[in-house]
Image: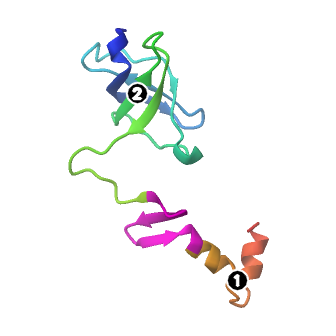
């Protein structure tokens, strides 16, 4: 691998969610040869769900094409996901098709004095 090939775009060949590892194919190289399994980046410590043929961004270490980290899938024009996680002003907001809610709002719900709700949440470990 040439030193200019540190950041590459490729496609998932295989993904093992349990191990957090994926192999990638680079069509401009040999479209039939996949890399060895590489670790998949965990944004916010949360595992990614990748599928065969997902377009991904990979960062390779300078000592070879078989050593690297799969950063994950990316949105292409018109393919933005309907969900998001955003950090704003010291709070985190989760958004989906049904709406959005912040961590502060969730904590407020947890602390609400709705009969039985607080006991249920505490029983779940909250």
Relative to 6, residue 126 above or below: below
The answer to which image quadrant residue 47 occupies is top right
Magenta-highlighted stretch: main secondary structure? strand
Label 2 residue SS: strand
In the figure, is residue 63 to the left or right of 83?
Answer: right
Q: Which quarter of the rendering shows the C terminus?
A: bottom right
Q: Are marks 2 and 1 in contact (CB under 8 Å)?
A: no
Q: Which residue position is annotated with label 2?
A: 58
Q: Going by the image, does 78 lie left or right of 25?
A: left
Magenta residues? 85-104
Q: Residue furthest front?
A: 89
x, y percentage for residue 125? Answer: 76, 66
The picture places residue 12, in percent across and down from the top left corner, at 38, 30
Asked if the stretch drawn in magenta spans residue 102, the answer is: yes
Q: Position of residue 5 (x, y in %)?
A: 34, 16
Residue at the spot of label 1:
117
Mark 2 or mark 1, which has the lower sequence index? Answer: 2
**Residue at (38, 34) in percent of width and height:** 52
Q: Nearer the viewer, mark 2 or mark 1?
A: 2
Is 78 positioned to the left or the right of 6 in the image? left
Q: Measured from the top left, where is residue 25 in percent x and y?
A: 35, 22
Which quarter of the image is occupied by the N terminus?
top left
Query: How far apart in space, not on screen, are marks 2 and 1 (Cα)?
Result: 45 Å
Q: Label 1, secondary structure: give it.
A: helix
Residue drawn 25% across and 44% down? 76
| Residue toward you, 37 or 45 | 45
Residue in view at x 57 percent, y 68 percent: 103
Residue furthest to the bottom in view is 115
């Amino acid at each position: 691998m040439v030193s200019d090939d540190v950041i590459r775009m490729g496609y998932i060949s295989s993904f093992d969610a349990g191990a957090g590892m994926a192999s990638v194919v680079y069509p401009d190289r040999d479209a039939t040869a996949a890399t060895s399994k590489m670790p998949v980046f965990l944004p916010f410590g949360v595992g990614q769900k990748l599928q065969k043929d997902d377009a991904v961004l990979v960062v390779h270490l300078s000592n070879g094409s078989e050593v690297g980290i799969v950063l994950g899938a990316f949105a292409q024009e018109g393919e933005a996901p309907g969900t998001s996680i955003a950090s704003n002003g010291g709070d985190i907001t989760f958004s989906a098709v049904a709406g959005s809610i912040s961590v502060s709002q969730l904590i407020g719900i947890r602390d609400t004095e709705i009969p039985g709700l607080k006991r249920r949440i505490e029983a779940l470990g909250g």
